[in-house]
Image (spheres, rainbow, N blue to C red):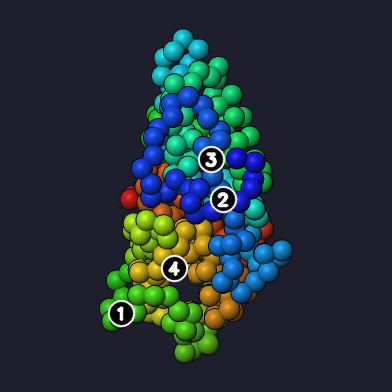
Amino acid sequence: MNGSSWGESDLPLGKRTGYVSVYTPSLLRGVSRASLREDLDFSTDKLPFYGFDIWTAYELSWLDMNGKPVVAMAQFQVPCVSDFVVESKSLKLYLNSFSQTKFKSYAEVVQTIESDLSVSTKSSVMVDLHTLSGYQSDGFGHFLGECIDNLDITIDQYQPSASLLALAEDDQEVNEALYSHLLKTNCPVTGQPDWASILIEYAGPKIDSESLLRYIVSYREYQDFHEHCVEKIYIDIMQQCKPRELTVYGRYTRRGGLDINPYRSSSNQALPDNIRLIRQ
């Protein structure tokens, strides 16, 4: 793939697919970010946020020069300014094509993946490889802030609407982090459920926590890609609640050996902690 757009009929997601075990970069497919952002109220020429999509690949293996398998964990950072997102099944197929291919070193694998993903997304993609022991030593992490999942509320809406969001009645100015493990969205191609935890960190007028939880749960029957869901949440909160600063960070559980973790922030100085949550 050379960075051109693909129609839905060209994507492998949701289709019976043969697996190639020899390095084949042409397996990669991309989806135009502009097409995903058509229903969001901002110009794609000037994004209202900064951020990355952080991918973790749990199923990566290749052969060393003696034909012995090597296994590793890979992490990719795709900037949100990229023209394309990588279609997840095509990435799985692409990584599987390393399995019977010989590489001289970790560095050669990193260079190869960085080059191919940068061409596919039309952006500069950063890649890190980790040994299993090194990745295991990092352990699990958790969001910092207040979990709002135990609020005793009634919910009856399962399609998102910005009108669900409300400010607290006391007009208090705060700087706080709220998170929930109750986010569920659905793949727009296959309809499969996508489970996630989400962190909302902001400064400005206090957001009513009950309204925020209702809003997060309202995505339960919504169908779209991970990246777009997080961007929609960011835009709705920014427009409805008008915080001075805002960060939205979604950590999705893995499917097909991959997890996708979109991070959007009003600050270009902030860098996300690439924490692995308990469900990941």
Query: Observer-nearest residue: 38 or 144?
Result: 38
Where residue 87 appears, as percent x and y from the top left, is 50, 48
Is tag 3's residue or tag 4's residue first in the polypeptide sequence? 3
Do callouts 2 and 3 mark residues in contact (Cβ within 8 Å)? Answer: no
Q: Earlier in the sequence, mark 2 or mark 1?
A: 2
Q: Residue at x 30, y 79 (%)?
A: 155
Residue at x-position 56% and y-position 71% = 39
Whole-Å distance between the Cαs marked 1 and 4?
Answer: 19 Å
Q: Which residue is mark 3?
A: 28
Dividing the picture into quarters, in which one does residue 257 lie?
top left
Q: Residues within 10 Å of mark 4 (few under 14, many from 20)?
A: many
Label 2 to label 3: alpha-carbon separation: 10 Å
Kindly identify which residue carries mark 2: 6
Q: CA distance from mark 2 to mark 1?
A: 38 Å
Q: Secondary structure at mark 2?
A: loop
In the image shown, does 63 or 11 lie closer to the viewer? Answer: 11
Which mark, residue 178?
4
The answer to the question of whether label 1 and label 3 lie on touching residues, with beta carbons closer than 8 A, is no
Q: Quadrant of residue 264?
A: bottom right
Q: Which residue is mark 1?
A: 155
Q: Nearer the viewer, mark 2 or mark 1?
A: 2
Distance from disc 3 to disc 4, alpha carbons, whole Å, reads: 36 Å
Amino acid, disc 1: Ile
Q: Secondary structure at mark 3?
A: loop
